[in-house]
Amino acid sequence: MNMPPGTRKVLQAIWKSKKPNSKAEIVRATGFSLATVTEHVETLVRSNLIIEVEMGNSTGGRRPRLLAFNHEAGYIIGIDLESTHVQVGITDLNCSVVSSKASDIDVAAGPAAVLDHIKEMIYSLLDESNIEISRIKGIGMGVPGPVEYSTGLPASLPIMPGWDRYPILQFLSQHFDCACYVDNNVYTRALGERTVEGVSGINNLIFLKIGNGIGAGIICNGQIYRGSTECAGDVGHINIGQDLLCYCGNRGCLETIAGGRAIVRRAEEIARNGQSEILAKIMATKGKISLEDFNRAVRESDPSAVELIRECGFQIGNVIAGLINFFNPSLVCIGGRVSEVGDVLLASIRQAIYHRSLPLSTRNLIIQPSILGEKGGIIGAAVLTVDKIIDDSLKKTKEGIFSF
C-alpha cells in the first residue's frame, strides 16, 4: 500500500514550523481533521521522523503531547559556490549549521577541478566534525548562474567556461551515496532567509544578491518562482541606459555598473587617478584592489568610495523599484558580498525604491539586509535538500514506513 498522500503535508508542516507542535496546531496548518492528522502522525512516529518531545499547556483538558521533527536523524551537506569562493557546511535536519569552512576558488578553472576541490572540503569537514559519511542524508548545492532545476544541469554562462550542462549531480553521486540537488544560489539564499523568525511567515518576497553578479530570488505565494525556463530573477542584465559592454554581449546591463567586478574596476580607476588616498595606498601596495578592500574604504568614510557605492545603490534601487511595482512583495532582503559594505549601500537602495516605486507598493514594504549573511547560502542549500527529500521520498515509499 502506498503511504497516505497527506503524510508529506503533515511532515512538512511540522518541519517548517521549526518548533514542537500539538496535533491541534497541525490541524490548523494542514486543514486536515484531527483523526487524519493522528493517522499520519502515527506513521511518521513509527518512521522515527517525528518524535514526542514534551507536554504542551492545557486549554482545559489533558495537556497535549507536542511533536517535533527528529533533526538528529542525520545530517545535510550545504554547498554555496560563487565565482571566486565557495562555502561548505554541515547542518542537522533542521538546517542549523553544525560546522562550515570557506575557500577561495575560481569557477573558470572548470567543473572537474572545482568539484574535486569541494569534494575534498567535504571529506575534511566530516573528519574534523567526527561525523560518519553514512550519516549524510543529502547534499544541496547552489551555483552562481542559471540551473535547469528539474535535471540539475547548469546553463551556459560566460564566466563559467566548461560548466554548460555539466553533470554536477552525477559527480556528487559518484562520491556520496545520498540524494543530491543543485539550484541557482540566489534561489537557495532566498530559501535560507525564509528560515529566519519573522521572515518565515512572509509568502511574497525578493531576495537580492549583490556580488560579482546581481540576481533576485523571488518567493511567490510561499514558493520559489523559477519561470518557464527556470531562469527568473536575472536582474543584473536589465538595461539601465549606460553604454558599457557586458560579458553577456549586451550594453548597459546593471552589472556593468553595480556588480562586484565593475565596482573593483571603477575603484582601481579612482586609485590610479589619485581621487582616493586610501585606495591609492592599497593599489600601490598590492597592485590591485579587492572587493573587501573597497568595502573597507567605504566603512572608513573615504569620500570617493562612498560616492561610488551610493551611485551603485541608486542604480540597483531603480531596477528593484520596477520589480516592486510589478510584483508587490512584502519584503526586499539584500545580501551578497557587495552588501557587506554596510548601511551606505542599503540607504541608497531604499532612497531609490521609495522615489521610484508607487506609494501603494511601499506602504508596508520592509527593506532590510540579510539576517543570515554569509551562512545563508549553505542553510538555503540544506533547506532545498531536506524539503526535496521529504517531497520525493514520501511519494515513493511503500508499506506506510519512511525513513531518511
Image (tube, rainbow, N blue to C red):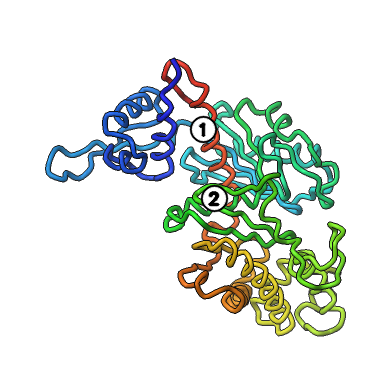
| Residue position marked by numbered label 1 in the rendering | 391
Q: Position of residue 217 (x, y in %)?
A: 61, 54
Q: Position of residue 9 (x, y in %)?
A: 42, 35
Examine the image and state in which quarter residue 179 appears.
top right
Q: Position of residue 162 (x, y in %)?
A: 85, 42
Q: Nearer the viewer, mark 2 or mark 1?
A: 1
Q: Say which of 317 and 180 sits in front.
A: 317
| Residue position marked by numbered label 2 in the rendering | 192
Q: Type of residue at label 2?
A: Gly
> Residue at 79% across / 48% down in the picture?
107
Q: Say which of 234 and 95 sits in front.
A: 234
Mark earlier in primary sequence (2, 1): 2
Looking at the rendered structure, which numbered label has been put on residue 401? Answer: none
In which quadrant of the rendered image does the N terminus lie? top left
Examine the image and state in which quarter residue 300 appears.
bottom right
> Residue at 52% across / 35% down in the picture?
75
